[in-house]
């Protein structure tokens, strides 16, 4: 016997209808490519989204068609997502920092019919267009109605393309399991893989995100979308902020400390989040200017754990810092480091330890850890195992795959190794592929990195497992010294020897000028492993220098939010 | 093309699984019938809910079977709901304050197979059992394993009934549109009608309820369930509190000011809600004892608008008071009176006006007002029309009905007359049936009542429309004076004449010792209309006295939360 409630499917475009109806005048501010600020609101974005839908229908777009965007976070980009999803087509944001080959692969794999591009990415698109023959036309986001000169196929300025839509169109109802968004993530091996979100999964994730212990947006919040919309569905904020009626600030391409600080101050931003490197820029700028942050209340740090000094710095501004953990395959939110009553009174080291964990899962995200025999492991904060996830916002397979990826119980393997403590806080101890397995025992590369960077003269360190003839794999350290530091390999080994077990001691320490990072600011272990794989086999002597391009733009295996 | 996310149906019992997994040790406290406090937690409630399911399966209960409860809010009652829904059966809480005839009608209409009863309701159940032949057995909630003496059919003590369940049972998956809960509400005419909630509607309502601008429960909250679980699905708190991992305090039968104040103080309650009369009791007790409330942060007032003095009194305790509006047919939450940025700086009269409104709707609750020709009316705060609702938690029809109740656009008519202002705040100006229609013009009985109670010597007033030979209907006032007041009918008319339009002036004022109230503390207009319908026709002279039983236990037409 079924319930007798209304049939009202969970559709992305209902969120923008709600925002326009209940919070139509709420301020939405975007940074344009020329640096100026464009002020709009949900009522206008709603109207323009409807025109996007109508323009797409004129192009012959039908349910399930993929429409790509290569663009920074702006209101134009936002209204495109809603306009695309509102017709039953699929928005497909692409990270412009990827290698051109990867972008071409992704567009061809997705069979995108139309590509929306920022004017600043025209030359990127031009360099790609011969390799992406299925793309019928490029729509260029411009500040005005004038199309910048380009040789792009079927190029048209966004405002011109949008001009014809009427105001009496309304979005249709359709089945909530219909695909709405497509986001690519590169797996541990091979080409990037697409995660195909449904309307249902996006709406449910946004609802979960808006509970107070998660992002918890309300109508009185002003949210700064620092995480780009092309990254892990923008942490779902392009949906959860309008759902709550929160103000939304979209920083465009200017992600430097000065530009973000200006937006945070002028727009009275109450809530934001992103990777630690971004906040380092903001803190440096604020320190130089002698400024504070008076409106900011909550800051979410994802990608990698928040350094302690950063936690302290924001605490002085009365900002609550919470860790955020997720991945593209999880819709993307998996856990947030908000307090439970038992942790509320922690101070000092225990508080810091809790804050370095990835957080706890909301309702609808089931997380468990499993051992070698796939047995469920205890939540004791020390037993670590493969972290798996189940829920309506977790992928069951990748776009184009022929079979589901789930285990017998319906869980998705995140590829992370983690502990979970008695309060449900997850602590990622390693990526499964980053774990060093020496003579059958696991060594946590993250823990070892932390011990190395505890040395006052070390700026940054990466630990990778490399081939060893006897132990299969042994850890080596690749580290960057602080400016002017004189620490030697021997001194650092001495420093470590009093802190870690003998079998954890790295087989070599290599000092370099800089370490490679991914586009999301994390250590690029993939590159390091490729570089040093045979280090202990071929050339078991320490090498003193090595240079990486600091801005290597490569997505990593799993995109932690 | 469908998305590729996991198939994970929204089921009520997943909420209790989540609470047990993530917040297993969180404190849940119930007041037993003997007044003592029983302390448990979500882990134990989960285990016991599983045993409820297994015991039901042993009774031969199958998907869709209705299982009634006649009980106060306790952890036993709570675990029954989860245990019932977890098997695919339907929990059906019944208001014990209803007339016996109504209870018998409801049980027969629902065809309940089993009835759970508090020991204090055994005699009520005994008086009914001959009239409810389909009930196979009564399970009695007792403080121990001993069954109180009774002549109830198949009676068994709850603990004995529960004893056999094992711990390795897990709840099944099934389709989320399956019915989970049944709540009766009496319509404007005729017998009570059942609203049949689905698992999906309950989970979605709980998610919406947990957004910060609504109830916004978090793991650090301690929620006092003052609204009985049998009333409008307990405002959805039996689901939204465990979903958030909030502590839950269940007051049982003792709803007096002293008992509630004790729980609020001892359990450090942060969040609660109910009808104004309950809070009157709490405030009086606190004043007598010279106590305050230090932990309480948010108070939700439903049923009728919060009197200004009450708002002020709680403000002195640093408690944010928010109005709550809903109805059984809406799952039940429709709107909460939380601030938007534009109202945040209001003070004095404008703030008070905003707080007297019913609030604004969250995502998934579409509210609109419609005029006589069913045209959509503007949100200007002054145009009033029929309030209609659409969404996944709104009923489309009643249990046993043969057709849907919705209009052509899929909206459910709430039966209320309301304005909506530019910020989306709904203000109920009247029940459609309470509106006085005089010579084709509408007079708001609620507004007129407010003008009457503005007089310093009036304690309470009801305005009803009664038959008038010339104008079809005219308003009369039935009022209770304050103790020692000497105001006369003439003086009150004089007082009103300077405040309202001439055609709003009541045709009579009748002073009474007390006014009839429903079980939820609201004026019983149905009874007043029946009493005074022919007042201006048959006996157009003022009557000085009239007595009602103060505790008339009748559900009203629409059950505002």
Image (tube, coloured by chain):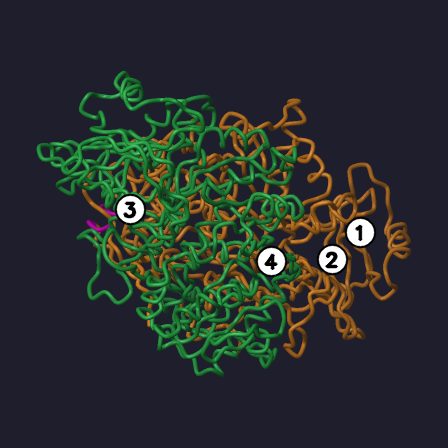
Chain colours: A green, B orange
Closer to the chain start, of discs 2 and 1, is: 1
Label 3 lies in what chain? Answer: A
Q: On the image, numbered disc 3 is attached to which residue?
A: A527
Residue B53, magenta (yes or no): yes
Residues flagged by tags 3 and 4 on a common chain: yes
Residue A406 is one of the magenta-drawn residues: no
Which mark is drawn over residue B463? Answer: 2
Residue A115 percent across, percent down from the top left: 44, 71
Q: Nearer the viewer, mark 3 or mark 2?
A: 3
Q: CA distance from mark 2 to mark 4?
A: 53 Å
Mark 2–mark 1 distance (CA, rounded to whole Å) = 9 Å
Q: Residues within 10 Å of mark 3 (few under 14, many from 20)?
A: some
Q: Using the image, determine if residue A543 lies above or below residue A496.
A: below
Chain bearing tag 1 is B
Tell me the element at label 4. strand
Left or right, B208 with reference to A449: right
Badges 2 and 1: C-beta atoms under 8 Å apart?
Answer: yes
Q: What secondary structure predominates along the stretch shown in magenta?
A: helix
């Amino acid at each position: 016997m079924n319930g007798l409630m209304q049939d009202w499917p969970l559709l992305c475009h209902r969120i923008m209808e709600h925002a326009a109806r209940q919070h139509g005048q709420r301020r939405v501010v975007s940074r344009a490519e020329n640096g100026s600020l464009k002020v709009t609101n949900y009522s206008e974005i709603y109207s323009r989204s409807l025109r996007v839908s109508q323009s797409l229908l004129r192009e012959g777009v039908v349910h399930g068609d993929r429409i790509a965007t290569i663009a920074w976070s702006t209101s134009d980009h936002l209204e495109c997502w809603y306009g695309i999803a509102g017709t039953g087509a699929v928005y497909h944001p692409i990270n412009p920092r990827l290698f051109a080959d990867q972008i071409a692969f992704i567009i061809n794999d997705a069979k995108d019919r139309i590509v929306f591009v920022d004017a600043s990415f025209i030359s990127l698109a031009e360099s790609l267009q011969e390799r992406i023959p299925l793309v019928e036309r490029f729509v260029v986001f411009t500040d005005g109605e004038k199309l910048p000169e380009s040789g792009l196929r079927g190029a048209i300025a966004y405002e011109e393309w949008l001009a014809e839509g009427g105001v009496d169109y309304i979005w249709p109802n359709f089945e909530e399991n219909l695909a709405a968004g497509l986001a690519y993530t590169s797996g541990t091996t091979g080409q990037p893989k697409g995660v195909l979100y449904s309307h249902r999964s996006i709406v449910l994730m946004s609802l979960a995100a808006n509970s107070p212990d998660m992002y918890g947006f309300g109508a009185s919040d002003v949210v700064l979308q620092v995480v780009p919309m092309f990254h892990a569905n923008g942490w779902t904020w392009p949906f959860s902020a309008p759902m709550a009626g929160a103000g939304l600030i979209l920083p465009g391409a200017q992600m430097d400390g000065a530009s973000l600080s200006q937006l945070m101050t002028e727009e009275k931003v109450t809530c934001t989040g992103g990777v630690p490197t971004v906040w380092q820029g903001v803190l440096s700028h604020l320190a130089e200017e002698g400024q504070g942050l008076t409106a900011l209340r909550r800051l979410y740090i994802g990608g990698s754990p928040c350094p302690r000094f950063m936690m302290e710095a924001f605490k002085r501004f009365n900002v609550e810092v919470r860790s955020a953990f997720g991945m593209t395959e999880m819709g993307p939110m998996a856990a947030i480091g908000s307090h439970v009553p038992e942790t509320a009174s922690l101070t000092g080291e225990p508080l810091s330890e809790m804050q370095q964990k990835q957080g706890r899962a909301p309702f609808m995200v089931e997380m468990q850890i499993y051992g070698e025999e796939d047995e469920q492991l205890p939540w004791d904060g020390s037993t670590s195992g493969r972290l798996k996830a189940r829920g309506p916002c977790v992928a069951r397979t990748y776009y184009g795959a022929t079979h589901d990826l789930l285990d017998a119980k319906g869980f998705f393997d995140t590829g992370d190794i983690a502990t979970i403590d008695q309060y449900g806080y997850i602590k990622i101890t390693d990526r499964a592929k980053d774990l060093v397995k020496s003579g059958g025992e696991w060594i946590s590369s993250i823990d070892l990195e932390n011990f190395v960077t505890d040395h006052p003269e070390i700026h940054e360190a990466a630990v990778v497992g490399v081939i060893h003839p006897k132990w299969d794999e042994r850890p080596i350290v690749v580290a960057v010294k602080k400016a002017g530091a004189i620490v030697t390999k021997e001194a650092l080994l001495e420093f470590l020897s009093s802190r870690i077990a003998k079998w954890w001691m790295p087989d070599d320490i290599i000092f370099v000028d800089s370490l490679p990072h991914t586009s999301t600011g994390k250590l690029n272990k993939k590159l390091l492993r490729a570089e040093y794989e045979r280090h202990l086999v071929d050339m078991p002597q320490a090498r003193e220098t090595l240079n990486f391009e600091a801005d290597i733009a490569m997505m990593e295996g799993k995109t932690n939010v």
